[in-house]
Amino acid sequence: KGVDELIRRDVTVTVPAFHKSLTVPFGFQNGRFNLIQPVGFQQTMESNVVNVACRHAVEGRSLYDHPDEKLGELKLIVVGSFAPESSEYKDVVSDILKENNVELHSIDEVQGLIDEIRTTGKKLPAELG
């Protein structure tokens, strides 16, 4: 969609809170390095949807608070796919993530994220591309 030169694929970072690596399919730079992670919210019970949101919120908060030595400051962006049964919890998920500096785009709103990349994304240095 015209953003290939602004995107890095298969980005791996360490999530300090969990002492583990996380690989996300896409990332882009616009002041912070944004890590784009697809997440399925397919659970039917609110507590299960909240648990998934909380896990990603903690990951995102940890990444936001601990810059990567190569990529610098980080931000997690969740592209959420909501099952019909879980779509009523989208606002709760959004609030949980937002409280932890994580951005949510539902899969049906992904064009807004593409537009953001197109307008704010910066070309990556060769060693990061």
Image (cartoon, rainbow, N blue to C red):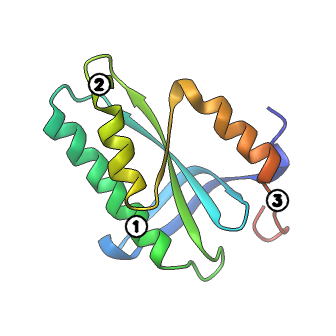
- x, y (%) of residue 85? 25, 19
Q: Amino acid at mark 2?
A: Glu
- CA gap between label 3 and label 2 equals 35 Å
Image point (46%, 55%), residue name: 102
Q: Amino acid at mark 1?
A: Arg
Q: N-terminal of the two: label 3 or label 2?
A: 2
Image point (35%, 57%), residue name: 57
- x, y (%) of residue 105? 52, 38
* Mark 3 or mark 2, whichever is nearer to me: 2
- CA gap between label 3 and label 1 equals 23 Å
Would residue 42 be found to the left or right of residue 101 on screen? left
Counting the numbered discs, the total is 3
Q: Is residue 110 above or below residue 7?
A: above
Around disc 1, counting alpha carbons within 10 Å, would you say few (fewer than 14), some (14 to 19), or many (20 or more)? Answer: many
Image point (74%, 46%), residue name: 117
Q: Amino acid at mark 3?
A: Lys
- CA gap between label 2 and label 1 equals 24 Å
- x, y (%) of residue 4? 81, 44
- Check disc 2 and report its element: helix, strand or loop: helix
The quadrant where residue 17 appears: bottom left
Would you name the residue on which mark 2 appears? 88
Image point (80%, 44%), residue name: 118
Would you name the residue on which mark 1 appears? 61
Would you name the residue on which mark 3 appears? 122
- Nearest the viewer among 88 and 72 is 88
- x, y (%) of residue 114? 71, 38
Rendered image: mark on residue 95: none
Q: Contact, CB < 8 Å: mark 2 with mark 1?
A: no
Q: Contact, CB < 8 Å: mark 3 with mark 2?
A: no
